[in-house]
Amino acid sequence: MSFSHPKISKKFRFQWEAAQNNYVLLYPEGMVKLNNSAGEILAQCDGLKSVPEIIHALEKKFETSGLEPQVIDFLEHATTQSWICEGGNG
Amino acid sequence: MDKSQISPPMWLLAELTYKCPLHCVFCYNPIDHHKSTTELSTRDWLRVLDEARKAGSVQVGFSGGEPLLRDDLEIIIAHAKSLGFYTNLITSGVGLNEKRIAAFKEGGLDHIQLSFQDSTKEMNDFLSHTKTFDLKKNIAALIKKYDYPMVLNCVIHKLNIDHIDRIIAMAEELGAEFLELANSQYYSWAFENRGHLLPTSQQLQKAEEITDQWREKLTDKMKIFFVVPDYHEKKPKKCMNGWGNIFLTVTPDGVALPCHTAKMLPGIEFPNVSDSSIADIWYESDAFNKYRGTGWMKELCQTCENRDIDLGGCRCQAYMLTQDATNADPVCIKSPFHHLVESAVADANNHIIPLKPLVFRK
């Protein structure tokens, strides 16, 4: 994982869409519709939490464990798509 | 089509005014736009935004005409932003100054698309570095200063396509991050001027080669989108991503349309936002249900394996070229009217230019 404290890249706006019942990423004249897990992971990317803290927060929220591989996979995908960038100090 | 299958009007195009300082020969505004004399008030637009957002609209484009000619644009943008819209301003930049862009920024405008609209005089100015280029340069500097991505749009056609190398170089010089080289689509004024504007196959091929060379050179520094004119294609475009599927236009006088040229189609009464709510218009109106999905199709489209891929192409193009909007878009090689498209391209390739002079948008 390339980012220690990922946050949403400035090129995108992340928001909840009540009419669609999902999170979206908005950019000039376009939109990425996110599935549930993608939306929940990005919602944790506030630039303050480290990746382990993100995983912990999700496992706590959904009362489950073993989310690490899924979260790491998605964060890698989000990095290639430039959806996220480094939010912390290193 | 079953109502539960209808997706929300994700994209709202707010055409705030037909007024425009430019006279582009390819403008898609209706040829008889001067007949519409009333414009929605500020309050009307704020209500349209409320209703559209409630119905699920996410992206809003402010266009025209030249939207900067509305002095309430700041209020309209700020309201859209407060509702959670992603706000796009589509402008020629004529009339933009620091005071206004600062107000847009404060109101939360997300994105500005700067267009090079006027094909002849402006393009010449542009290519020769004179007045217009200076104007665009100043606007581009403002766009950067206010931390917007630089998105340039240039409509391409026979009269400027040979300058594409220069156009891309200028865009780079202006610091554009995105450049859309959109070949003119043949509706409204561009249809009137088609014989003057449709490029030859050779011109098109050359332009694409040059564009590819630039792409290689610039890699990620500037992304270039090249939109091919569909007359040179054999498969029709999925026009507007489908009639009444994601796209809703509201004209300056409040008419709701499934695309910005649909008003030309006969026998459809398009609803007005002054009489019905956006949700009613989108889900219930006859106009928005007329060509939604595939139920309206004739046999040729109905039985085609590409039926759901292109949805029969463009209704307006079918109507303009075959006088029947339920025919397949004649760009389709299977259409019995495909020869009409081929002959237009053949005329272009044979350098046959109409005797009728180029008509400038009034």
Image (cartoon, coloured by chain):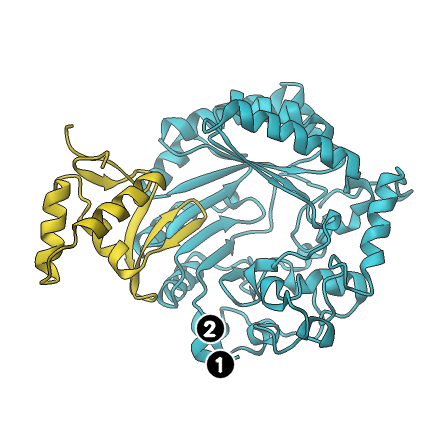
Chain colours: A yellow, B cyan
Q: Secondary structure at mark 2?
A: loop
> In this figure, what is the number of numbered marks?
2
Camera-side residue: A40 or B44? Answer: A40
- Other-residue count near label 2 (Cα within 10 Å), few / some / many at <14 / 14–19 / ≥20: some
Judging from the image, mark 2 belongs to the subunit labelled B
Left or right: residue B306 versus residue B73 is: right
Q: Amino acid at mark 2?
A: Ile
**Are dots 2 and 1 in contact, CB under 8 Å?**
yes
The image shows residue B63, relative to residue B160, as above or below, that is below
Give the image location of residue B127, x and y in percent. 66, 22
Residue B160 appears in the figure: no
Q: Quadrant of the C terminus of chain A?
A: top left
Query: What residue is shown with label 2?
Result: B6
What residue is drawn where x is 34% and y is 49%?
B78
- Separation of residues labelled 2 and 1 (CA atoms): 7 Å
**Looking at the picture, which amino acid does disc 1 mark?**
Asp
**Callout 1: SS:** loop
* In the image, residue B183 above or below residue A31: above
Instruction: Specify the quadrant of the image occupied by residue B102.
Output: top left
Residue A73 bears which disc, if any? none
Q: At 49% from the left edge and 62% from the top edge, which residue is drawn?
A: B246
Percent from the top left, x then y, of residue B60?
Answer: 44, 53
Q: Residue at x 65, y 74 (%)?
A: B268
In the image, A36: left or right of B199?
Answer: left
Dot 1 corresponds to which residue? B2
Quadrant that contains the N terminus of chain A: top left
**Residue A60 location in percent, x, y?**
8, 57
Q: Tell me where residue B261 appears, x and y as whole percent.
A: 64, 59
